[in-house]
Every structure is written in structure tokens, then in C-alpha cells.
Image: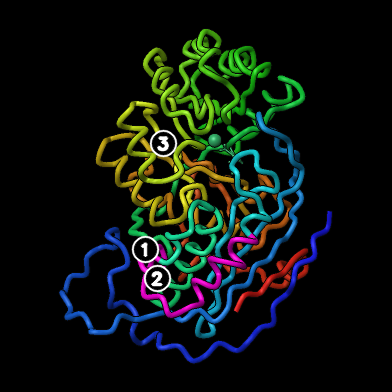
Amino acid sequence: MSILLQQLLHREGRCGIFSPAMQGSSKILDHQPETQTPEIKPQIKPQIKIAGVELRLIRLPLVEPFETSFGKIDSRLIFLVCLEAEGLRGWGEVVAEEEPLYSYETVQTALHVIRDFLGPAVLASPISDLDDLVKRLAPFRGHNMAKAGLELAFMDLMAQTREQSLSALNGGELERVAVGVSLGIQPTISRLLERVDRYLKLGYQRIKLKIKPGWDIDVVDEVRRKFPDILLSVDANAAYTFRDLDHLKQLDDFNLLMIEQPLQYDDLMDHARLQEVMKTRLCLDESIVNLRQARLALELDSCRIINVKVGRVGGYSEALGIHDLCVSREVPVWCGGMLESGIGRAHNLALASLKGFTLPGDISASSRYFDRDVISPEVTVDPDGTVVVPNGVGLGFEVDLDFIRHMTETRVYVS
Ligand code: OSB
Ligand code: MG
């Protein structure tokens, strides 16, 4: 199906009142390390006047199909957001998928919501910091992935104006982050065993197996027999209900690090009932759509580990809040993934560089999913199962604009 999208004309942005000379004088986040010398705050905060919001959809083929309990894909329609301001470009990614299966959002709902509501809100007047942006987007209900795309791009812009890395801007302290791999449902168990072996040899520190009814207990049993000592987890993507209790209880036999999102996406109550009778820690992914839900989930003991995805929770602001909540409650937290291009992957690295992210994240090498990535150098995993957090300004990677232009299926410009 081809949808005609109107390409809005690019108007020259008016001269903004933001200037790089004014950088560094306002506090963006609580996470920012304190500066040693207290400065007198200027009356006027530095502001960023966004001149245009460019949205691009590019289709990247996957090196092999990726199958979960909710479906199988062999390519990823990547949604890139580029904010232009004062001659700089800030890049973000909307992680929504084409079909509303993981979440209700889709590439097309996000395109609509950004073009018609969020984009105009961002363009309306200069933005002083992340909180300012969050406030501006808050009246629009839901559509977290769409909002996050703008937040990510804004933070890249902000990092560039302050000549900082995104990691530093977030208050990240780790120079390397530990990573694991998420292995989709395979046609055969022997193929899965081969994949497990392959990714362990590449250094990945944790193996996560996608499961669904009919591809669960026996599969996990075989993997655990062959690899008795590895960090192993499973992710059901909401494929079960509380009625499957006796079946799910069998997973307690495999010394799993966690069981991710076994039950329905909005069911904190049944997750709490399940956690009460399971030895293995439950981890919530789909259910944690914001800081409030994270609080509620921990309060109800619906899970004992949290997966943070910056897209699912609506951006850095909420993601950092959930990180802090987990740290204060001593609940392990880790950074999830959504088969992002290098741009989303770079943002995930910047997030995962916060000290509270103690479990390996779903941050694979670019080559685990794509033949060619949109950034250079591409993300690589070292033999010790870590990825270096770049310390260059902004994303810390070059964005390959020629390749992005070449691959663009749809371009929308809002100004
Ligand atoms: O549930 O974590 C998930 C991918 C798409 C949608 C949901 C999920 C995933 C993954 C892959 O598990 C994580 C990654 O490597 O990006
Ligand atoms: Mg998951």
C-alpha cells in the first residue's frame, strides 16, 4: 500500500535567539554532574529555535527474519527524525513498527501525530531545555514513541550546542556498556542452538530467547542443557495469560535471569499474582509505558526487574526517571532495544551509560541486524561483550546522510 504524503515546503528558519556562546549555562537534568564553580545564572536561558522537523522513512532489510510471539518481519521501516536549528541537525528515531502489535503506535500514527501536532508544537517558539520540550508535548496524550523521536533529536541538538556527548549530557558515567542478544523464534531448535553458540562466541554476555506457546519449555530446556552456565533469559512479549500459570511455573527449573513480559501488556495485577508464585524474577517491558506505571509495578510487585526503552516511555525524561526509581529501590534495570538503526542505537548507548543500568542491554552490533547502517562507524561489540560508549560530540557517530537520502521512501518536512 502506498500512501501519498504531502511534502511541505522548506521555509528558511527565522533567526533564533539561541547562540552557541550561551551554551552550558542552564541545568538540563538532575543527572548532569554538578559544575565545580557555581555560576550566576543568566536572566535569559539559552534557547533553541527549531527551524524545521524533517521526517524520513527508510526501509532496511534485516540480515535474517526476526520472529517474536506477535509476528515475523524481514525488514525494518526505520523512522528518522531530524531537527534543524542554527545550522545544526539533531537526530532521533521513532521506534514504532509498521503494525500495532508490540504497541498501539505504528509508523503511520507517529508520522501523523508528529506532522500534525507534535511538530507544530516544537516549532511554535524557542525551547530552553528538555523539561521545556516535555511540557510542550505533555498535553498530547499517549504516542510515546512519536514524542521520544523528537526528544532524542532535541537532545542530540542540545549535546551539540554544548559540545558534549549525549552520554555526558545524560549524566552517563560508563565508558563501556555490557550487552546481550535477543534471539527470535527459529524454525528449528538446532538452528537456535547454533545461533546461541554463535553469539556467545562473539562475546555477548546474555542470551535472551523469544518464547511463545509451543516454543517455550522444551526449547529453554535444550538451550540450558547445552549451555548450563550462561546468563539466560526469555521474553514472551505478552503471549500468555494467568491461566497458563502451571505451564509458566516450569520455567522456574532453568535458572533464568528473568522472564520478560509473560502476560498481557496492561496487566500489572496478574503479573503480581504470577510473581508471587514464581521463583524467577519477572521483568516488565510492554507494561512500563511511563514513570507512573513503573512506580505502580514496583509497588504491586508485578516485576523485580525493569526493561527501559526510551521510545516506549516517551523519551529521555521518563527513561531517566525510571532509571532513578529503580536505583533508589535497588531494582535491576536494563536498556531494551527495538531493532533500531544506528541512530536509535547510539541513543540507547547514551542511555545505557548511566550507572544504574547494571544488566546487559539489548544493544547488538549493527551487523546483527543490518548489512549497512546509517551511521559510521557502525556499532560493534567487543569480544568481552561490551560496546564502547562514544565520547564525541552529540551522537558520537557520523550520520551517513547520503545513504539515508538514497534509502528514503517517504520524506515529510514540517516548518
Ligand atoms: O520485546 O524486547 C522486545 C524487538 C522488537 C520489539 C520488541 C522487542 C524486541 C527485541 C529486540 O527483543 C531487541 C533488540 O535487539 O533491539
Ligand atoms: Mg521485550
Q: Of residues 72 and 252, which is closer to you in this image?
A: 72
Q: Is residue 328 left or right of residue 109?
A: left
Circle 1 SS class: helix
Disc ID at residue 278: none
Q: Which residue is mark 1?
A: 168
Q: Of residues 381 and 308, which is closer to you in this image?
A: 308
Sequence order check, earlier mark of 3 and 1: 1
Residue found at x 65% / y 59% = 79
Say which amino acid is labelled 2. Answer: Gln
Which part of the image, by quadrant, shows the C terminus?
bottom right
CB within 8 Å, label 1 to label 2: yes
Q: With respect to residue 269, does 347 lie above or below? A: below
Figure disc tally: 3
Say which amino acid is labelled 3. Answer: Ile
Q: Residues within 10 Å of mark 2 (few under 14, many from 20)?
A: many
Q: Which residue is mark 2?
A: 164
State the extent of the magenta-drawn residues as a range: 111-135
Residue 222, quarter of picture? top right
Q: Is residue 57 visible?
A: yes
